[in-house]
């Protein structure tokens, strides 16, 4: 369905989204090694975050999946300072967990991830032609819930799951392509 579509550069009013690459590893390691960033992510994220883990993740997880047309990963950069990555967003051809994102605390709460989600979700539905978008999040992750609510997503399931900070309720949120189109004509 969506194989071999490369990860394009995407732009929003304030952001440039560039495909993740090995050169991002040092900055990724520095920003991601932060409790505020990782606490509500899946327990599959190792914590304490090992030295060199960002480079391993980019090389062994992200880049092969991008090359296989199964995942699309971008770094977020401000148009005003494009040298500096400030966060990451990705979409994945995976049940119940099709979009992930994080942005470092100094840039949170400014509507930046909402901007990134708008172009990446458009890519998911219009370029990849996916019929629906399903995302997983900790129920206590208020910023993530509000972002999905604002996009028009619905909570469709919840269950206990393991996060970096321990066991929490995990919620699955969904939006179909038709629902997205009605809001984004
Ligand atoms: C979740 C996250 C990506 C949101 O990014 P952001 O750029 O701060 O989000 P936005 O500024 O676009 O805000 C989205 C909504 O969350 C709200 N919000 C932002 N920070 C918040 C906070 N700390 N507490 C509660 N709500 C918050 C905003 O007010 C906005 O709601 P609104 O649309 O109703 O006004 C960011 O908080 C983050 O990186 N968290 C750590 C990693 C993470 O949890 N990733 C998601 C895993 S599911």
Image: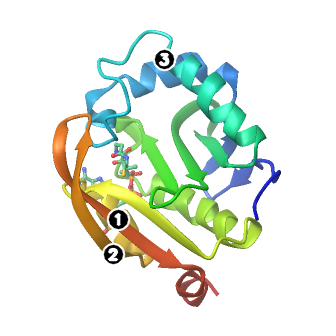
Is there CB contact under 8 Å for labels 3 and 1?
Answer: no
The relative height of residue 21 versus residue 39 in the rendered view (above or below) is: above
* Separation of residues labelled 3 and 2 (CA atoms): 33 Å
Is there CB contact under 8 Å for labels 1 and 2?
Answer: yes
The relative height of residue 44 versus residue 108 in the rendered view (above or below) is: above
Q: Nearer the viewer, residue 36 or 98?
A: 98
Q: Residues within 10 Å of mark 2 (few under 14, many from 20)?
A: few
The image quarter in which residue 167 lies: top left
The quadrant of the picture occupied by the C terminus is bottom right
Q: Which residue is mark 3?
A: 53
Which residue appears at 43% of the width and 26% of the height? Answer: 31
Ligand 1 shows up in the quarter that is: bottom left
Which residue appears at 40% of the width and 53% of the height? Answer: 110
Question: Which badge, 3 or 1, comes first in the chain's sequence?
Answer: 3
Q: Which residue is mark 1?
A: 172
* Separation of residues labelled 3 and 1 (CA atoms): 27 Å
Question: Which badge, 3 or 2, comes first in the chain's sequence?
Answer: 3
Q: Position of residue 29 (x, y in %)?
A: 48, 20
Kindly report which numbered mark, 3 or 2, lies closer to the viewer in this rendering: 2
Which residue appears at 32% of the width and 55% of the height? Answer: 137
The relative height of residue 172 versus residue 182 in the rendered view (above or below) is: above
Whether residue 79 is visible, yes or no, is: no
Q: Which residue is mark 2?
A: 156
Q: Is mark 3 within 8 Å of ligand 1?
A: no
């Amino acid at each position: 369905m969506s194989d071999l579509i490369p990860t394009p550069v995407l732009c929003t009013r304030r952001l440039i989204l560039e495909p993740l690459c090995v050169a991002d590893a040092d900055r990724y390691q520095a920003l991601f090694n932060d409790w505020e960033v990782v606490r509500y992510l899946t327990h599959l994220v190792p914590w304490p975050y090992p030295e060199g883990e960002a480079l391993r993740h980019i090389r062994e997880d992200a880049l092969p999946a991008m090359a296989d047309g199964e995942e699309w990963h971008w770094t977020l950069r401000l148009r005003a300072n494009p040298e500096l990555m400030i966060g990451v967003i990705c979409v994945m051809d995976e049940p119940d967990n099709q979009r992930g994102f994080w942005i470092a605390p100094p840039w949170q709460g400014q509507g930046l991830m909402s901007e990134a989600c708008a172009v990446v979700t458009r890519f998911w539905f219009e370029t990849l032609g996916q019929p629906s978008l399903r995302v997983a999040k900790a129920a206590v992750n208020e910023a993530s819930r509000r972002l999905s609510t604002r996009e028009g997503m619905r909570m469709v399931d919840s269950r206990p799951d393991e996060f970096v900070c321990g066991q929490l309720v995990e919620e699955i949120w969904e939006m179909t392509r038709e629902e997205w189109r009605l809001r984004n004509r």
